[in-house]
């Protein structure tokens, strides 16, 4: 009996080790499911952040044409990485609007000059109020919004080349 108790710590350690190894090998579902998908875009009206672009109003998204809404910032490194793909979407005829998060006009102008300007409108969300109402917690994030103002899809993180077909399909399905 006493000899069996000596092996108990080793058996517990082996069991714990097995659980950890199994947990590390099992694939995790890394999909983030947005609570806003399928719901109407929250009402907002944001002033423009730069002189050459108008601000952004949620009423624009109720005019019958699906659009992309990109949440970005000039200080965001992944936003720089996605810029060429947003420019590609623009050349394909996709209307893209943006919300600039906690940023300044000169910084946004510099960002657009360096990385291209795919946006029709850019709203200034100084305190991230609209960003949070969208269920967005970081930058960049992109929303596919149908012509009735409903969020069809939320893409978290930078848009990569392999993401473009899915975004185009979501826009096509949102008509």
Image: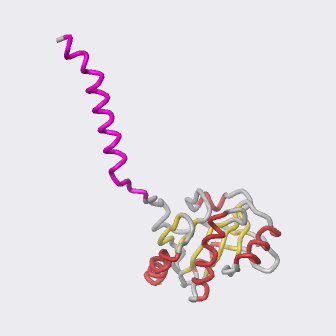
Residue sitting at the far top? 2
Residue 42: percent from the left, percent from the top? 58, 65
The residue under the point 49% across, 74% down is 163
Q: Main secondary structure of the magenta part?
A: helix
Q: Is residue 13 above or below residue 22?
A: above
* Residue in front for this viewpoint, 44 or 117: 117
Specify the segment rendered in magenta.
2-30
Q: Is residue 86 above or below residue 78?
A: below
Q: Quarter of the image for the N terminus: give it.
A: top left
In the image, is residue 124 part of the stretch drawn in magenta? no
Residue 26: percent from the left, percent from the top? 33, 51
Residue 56: percent from the left, percent from the top? 69, 73
Task: Locate residue 19: give its quadrant.
Answer: top left
Task: Locate residue 136: give its quadrant.
Answer: bottom right
Q: Is residue 126 left or right of residue 21?
A: right
User: What is the total number of numbered labels drawn onto the structure image?
Assistant: 0
* Residue in front for this viewpoint, 137 or 109: 109
């Amino acid at each position: 009996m006493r000899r069996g108790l000596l092996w108990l710590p080793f058996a517990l350690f082996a069991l714990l080790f097995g659980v950890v190894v199994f947990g590390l090998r099992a694939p995790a579902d890394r999909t983030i499911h947005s609570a806003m998908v399928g719901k109407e875009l929250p009402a907002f009206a944001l002033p423009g952040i730069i002189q050459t672009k108008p601000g952004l109003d949620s009423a624009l998204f109720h005019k019958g044409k699906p659009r992309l809404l990109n949440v970005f910032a000039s200080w965001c490194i992944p936003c720089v990485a996605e810029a060429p793909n947003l420019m590609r979407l623009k050349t394909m005829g996709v209307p893209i609007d943006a919300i600039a998060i906690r940023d300044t006009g000169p910084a946004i102008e510099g960002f657009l000059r360096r990385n291209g300007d795919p946006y029709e409108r850019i709203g200034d969300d100084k305190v991230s109020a609209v960003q949070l109402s969208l269920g967005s917690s970081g930058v960049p994030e992109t929303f596919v919004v149908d012509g009735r103002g409903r969020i069809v899809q939320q893409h978290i993180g930078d848009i990569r080349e392999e993401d473009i077909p899915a975004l185009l399909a979501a826009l096509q399905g949102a008509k």
